[in-house]
Image (cartoon, coloured by chain):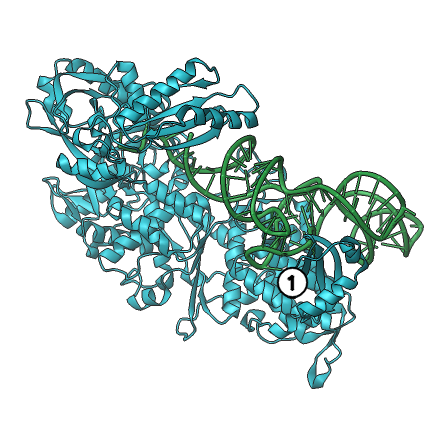
Amino acid sequence: MEKYTHKNIEKKWQEKWQEENLNKVEENSEKEKYYVLDMFPYPSGDGLHMGHTESYTASDIIYRFKKMQGYNVLHPQGFDSFGLPAENYAIKTGVHPKETTKVNTDNYLEQMKMLGLGHDLDHLVYTSDPSYYKWTQYLFGKFFENNLVVQKTDTINWCSSCNTGIANEQVEGGKCERCKTEIEQRDVPGWFFRITDFADELIDDLDKVDWPEHTKKNQKAWIGKSEGAKLKFKVKDFKEKIEVFTTRPDTLFGVTYMVLAPEHELLETLKSSISNFDEIEKYQKETQKKTELDRMEGKEKTGVELKGIKAINPANGEEIPIFIADYVLAGYGTGAIMAVPTHDERDFEFAKKFDLEIRQVVAGVYLWIKPNKELTELEYSCLEELGKVIKNNKGTKKKHINFGTNGAKIVCSFDTKENLEIGTEAIKNYLTNDTKLSFIEVCFTENGSLINSGKFDGLTSGEAKTKITEFVGGEMTSTYRLRDWSISRQRYWGCPIPIVYSPEGEAKFVGEENLPWLLPEDVDFVPTGEAPLKNSKELHERVEKLFGKGWTPEVDTMDTFVDSAWYFLRYPDTENENEFCSVEKLKKWFPVDIYIGGAEHTYMHLLYARFFVKAMKKIGLIDFDEPFMKLRHQGMVLDKEGVKMSKSKGNIVNPNEMVKRFGADAVRNYMMFAAPLEDDVVWDENNIVGVYRFLEKVWKICTEKELIDCENGKCADVPKEIKTALHKTIKKVTEDIESLSFNTAISQMMIFSNKALKHEKLPKPALEKFLILLAPFAPHMTEEIWREVFKNEKSIFLAKWPEYNPEMIKDDVIELIVQVNGKVRDKIKVEAEISEEDAKVKALESEKVKNHIKGKEIRKVIFVKGRLISFVV
RNA sequence: GCCUCGGUGGCGGAAUUGGUAGACGCGUUGGACUCAAAAUCCAAUUGUGGCAACACAGUGAGAGUUCGAGUCUCUCCCGAGGCACCA
């Protein structure tokens, strides 16, 4: 038999599998379903990259594994084919995005085939194809009818380089996630999905899904629920009220001024009463000019007082000044705050700068200790000194200490105003005598006991929150960081928003009968800052023809994240022209069982897809509320030096080239073996020899050894070692694929092959079972052996996944660990089922153990069956 | 600043969830085969001391719980990722 050569076999089987329709989902099957989903790629001109290779290999292994386990598996693929790169390429070269997309997607399909990925190619999805975006528009229409997508003018993020508005999720550190241009704020009319209506569900339902903990936590943080109260402040001599949101209504008595966002709408209303309005306008303009980044970086507080008007604190009737300042954001809460300098750091800073009253209403102080000694000594002295200072303060309720690099921060809270004063006094007196301690006046942001708060004095913050809110007629409520999803894009290569406007300017859905609402082709791509569709003659004519004179089209296109927010719902029924997916198929296939893809999608795609499913459930289009039951991320693929691969660094590795050199099976196995799926993988082709040698060994075992067919009891003399190793391997590989621990599955198969290599005669049934285990990882080579060497008629992927026999993995004789005082002193061979008494006798026979015990009394014996015996002396 | 995840040989990484630390692979060293090289095979490979048996140390640092800690608790240091004037 010939040596293992990937070149001879991989292409052959790829063609054969396609001919035999091996990867097609079974349309009418009684088998249990399993839906394995990949994050579909954006078809760029560069082709698949190594990151795709890794995650697609992982899902392919799961697909083949589940298939052999007897499931009917849906494992589809598609293309997120609308988007900016194709459009930018068109601007540069004049080639229509449609052409580019075709070329690129064909290339992707070819590459996926080369990797041996078993996608069902009869269920492809292209988001830029009218047969798909028809349904994107249909869903938009449904959302429109149900008030889940609304048109409003809002301050949105604007990227001047991409010449379009973008969603909050698409801003990274104040810059455009695509082109890194600094984002400006603009007031632009546009369409918004009302994702904020689902904020609570989006948080709560994360408990239902099996996702990485950090992904859930990050998504929760992104939604950013904070619980607090809405309170109203009267403006003196006006009927208008300023509404604020606060998480600390318990500090209401400490409010000494208010701040409005510069964009706050009340400013227009009160204009005539504000004596320094010119100053206000100047500040407003300055704020507007600032990019998001400036506003974040300029931490120095700025602002202007509204002269001539005052607000009234509803708790105590005091008149307090009102400011505008850009540290208050228009888009969050109510765009206005009550300022409590003693208990909020930002308010504190602002109050210091503008010399405003600072009034403490929660009884507590911070005490700092700066290190002028070694840190361990500091810890000691810190505790000691704090103890001295507040030892006799009976009113001290709690104290805790946080040590940091710059010293230690001690939090002291007290139960009454009196005790706070006594405590603070004692600390201050102490400080004059000691240089290691410094009392730093900072606002106290913890909860504590109330003081200076009238009849609420003595209550804890927790109690006071509801009571004070009630007292001033406010309401307890929550607010979110999450913004509504802005989806209008002033670009060409996207899904047209299926809306037309009446001559009076009223928006109307174009109607299901007019779908797909085609993207016009008579359009100049060159960006002008205006939507390219505005200049389409065909589109305007189409609208007037259908709706009458004076009617005009919506000319913005949708964010491409809309396309990808529901694509997985289309896969089971891609040919359906009457529904986005039939009811039966929805029932059969959803939710998705496992979804694999990058962690960078936590805030965008994964959040949007969850929103879509929830919104669709709400209007009765589907009956499940979470799209992806299990989610796992793959790590990044790094170059040899451990640097992230990128075009600009020129360290991109081309999967095609690697497949040509080493074969798809070796590339797949290397990616899976090098590190756990979720960890980063270093792509070092020098290391690929390891898995290549492993494949060669398997080849050798199956082609050069004498195989016993095991009929008529001929396998009675098969070494026990091989049988045990096989069953252990079946167990390990099965469990490891289930838990996506592909690296350890492969190492277990390596152990088996190393053992098998040592024997000259091997049982063929055992090797067949082993081949099945390896098949998901190395589909080509195992198929070659399965059919060409072992002469099986049908594909290995139609074989049944083996099961292990628990009896077979038990060792008769084990090494029992013998410990003395917790240290391993000997290992003795004993029968696996040995009793404690027998083990004790045997262990004590050991010379080594005797040496360590001699002269001492055995106080205790710990026996772990089949594992160890431990003597305590 | 806050949140999350990590830190184990020369390297990538294992460790049944508290029970032999370093599986498996790469690399390195020695040997076999060869005129030679490649490939392949065999052996060794955490460190220190010792010819050896063996002993001691050892999973970022320090403490703690335990007969026993990579694993649990606390504090600290370092790294990666995310969020960041969100009231």
User: Where's the N terminus of chain A, which quadrant?
Assistant: bottom right
Q: Is residue A556 placed above or below A730 in the rendered structure? A: above
Q: Residue at x 39, y 20 (%)?
A: A427
Q: Quadrant of residue A305?
A: top left
Number of marks drawn: 1
Near-viewer residue (A858 or A363): A858
A358 vs A64, nearest the viewer: A358
Q: Is residue A640 left or right of residue A311?
A: right
Q: Position of residue A333 (x, y in %)?
A: 23, 35
User: Please, what is the three-letter code of the amino acid marked with disc 1?
Assistant: Phe
- On the image, the x and y values in percent for residue A184 come to 31, 27
Q: Is residue A122 visible?
A: yes
Question: Relative to the observer, which residue lies in front, A526 or A56?
Answer: A56
Which image quadrant for residue A228?
Answer: top left
Secondary structure under the numbered disc 1 in the rendered image: strand
Chain represented in green: B
In the rendered image, residue A426, in percent from the top left (x then y), is placed at 37, 20
Q: Which residue is mark 1?
A: A863
| Local crowd size for mark 1, using a 10 Å CA cut-off: few (<14), some (14–19), many (≥20) | some
Q: Horizontal placement of A90 versus A793: left or right?
A: left
For residue A20, say whether it is visible: no
Chain identity of mark 1:
A
| Residue occupying the point 53% across, 19% down | A372
In the rendered view, tell whether residue A201 sits above or below residue A94. below
Write down the colour of chain A.
cyan
